[in-house]
Image: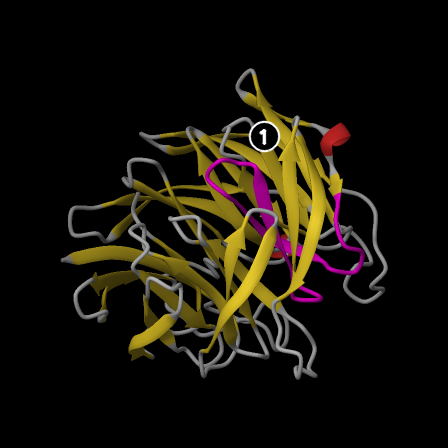
Amino acid sequence: MVLTLYMGSYTEYPVPGFGGTGKGIYTVQFDTMTGELKVLHSTMVRNPSYLALDSSSQHLYCVTELDQKDGPMVKTFKIKRDFSLELMDEQPIRGGFPCHIVTHEDHLLVTCYATGNLIHLLTDGDSGVRKVVNNFFHHGKSINLERQEGPHAHQTAVHPNRKAIYVCDLGIDTIKAYRFKEGTVQPDTANDCVVSLGGGPRHMVFNKQGTYAYVLNELTADVDVLQYLDGKLKQVGSYSSLPVHFEGMPSASAIRIHPNGKYLYVANRGLEAITVFEIFGSELKRVHMQYTEGQELREFNLTPDGQWLIACHQNSHDTIVYQILDTGELVECYRTRDIKSPSCIVFPN
């Protein structure tokens, strides 16, 4: 069986030492029998670091991760019959270094790292983005004077109830709460959740029931466990994803939950490894660590059937395919360097 997926990349260096030499958005064919990857198409876009598909997998959206002075955008592409992309629309946005985008029905939610804000856009399936509805700027700072001098929104997650919205803000150690109401997004500040100080929340995932959220802290590589009860998040635990002998600077990058809800996967740059936890509600047990043997393990994703994990290194250009065993452990099956500076992987719904 063949599965078509899409990968974002960094195509330039917006700041010294950070960026890449990718060719934009890659259309990739994945052989689910062998694990082999084959590039079918590439579409040049400036720093399409994060991608999102609509619920019908007919349209693909991306952010262009650029400084505000360089005109970052949200771009909409139509997915053609051969899985190549046709540009439909490009919408300028007010924010610096947009780093994450997620879809929900006809809504797009974009988080901007440099300016610490959440942008809400509405879409139109026939033409792309209809309009920018709201732009919410965060305020504050935290205890890491170098990285937390101000707000740095990093990811938006929609609760399984499809109403509550949460934004991980690395700069203020807070999961900012919003909600869908009457077709728009509104702040829900009474339900903001402060997490481990100095941790720097980067990404979060919910279990299917929505009873627990697992927050990955970039600056410490700890996973904070949050319980969702009566509409509020409360931290009930914290677990390190690093080995005890690690002496470098933590730089956690991505977190995913297995479709069966039993395992949690965490990526760490510098260590260049994926840590696997078994989930027991509010408690996590580390069961495996897979060293990925590359440079700058930025992102990974699991196939919808939960049988494969694909990971990508931004700096060494390695994209690795792992088979997922029943124990949650990973076994490498394929590796390629055909995809330059990869930063994101999305699968059709």
Q: Is residue 193 above or below residue 153?
A: above
Instruction: Indicate yes or no whether the magenta region holds residue 178.
Output: no
The quarter in which the C terminus is drawn is: top left
The vertical placement of 139 against 16, above or below, is above
Q: Find residue 5 and report its image quarter.
A: bottom left
Q: Which residue is mark 1?
A: 164
Question: Where is residue 81 drawn, in percent x and y?
Answer: 16, 46
Taking the spot 70% from the left edge, 47% from the top edge, the residue there is 236
Residue 12 placed where, x, y %? 50, 70
Q: Position of residue 179 (x, y in %)?
A: 61, 27
Q: Nearer the viewer, residue 45 or 255?
A: 255
5 vs 254, left or right, is: left
Quarter of the image where one finds residue 246: bottom right
Q: Which residues are magenta?
A: 194-222
- Find residue 133 and report its horizontal and vertical position in percent: 57, 28
Q: Is residue 169 left or right of residue 5?
A: right
Give yes or no for residue 206 being in the magenta stretch. Answer: yes
| Colour scheme shown | secondary structure
- The total of numbered circles placed on residues is 1
Name the residue located 46 percent from the left edge and 39 percent from the top edge: 208
Q: Nearer the viewer, residue 35 or 228?
A: 228
Location of residue 213 (image quadrant)? top right
The answer to whether residue 35 shows anywhere in this view is yes
Crowd rating for badge 1 (residues with CA inside 10 Å; few <14, some 14–19, many 20+): many
Q: Residue at x 39, y 63 (%)?
A: 24
| Residue in the image at 39% along x and 78% along y | 318
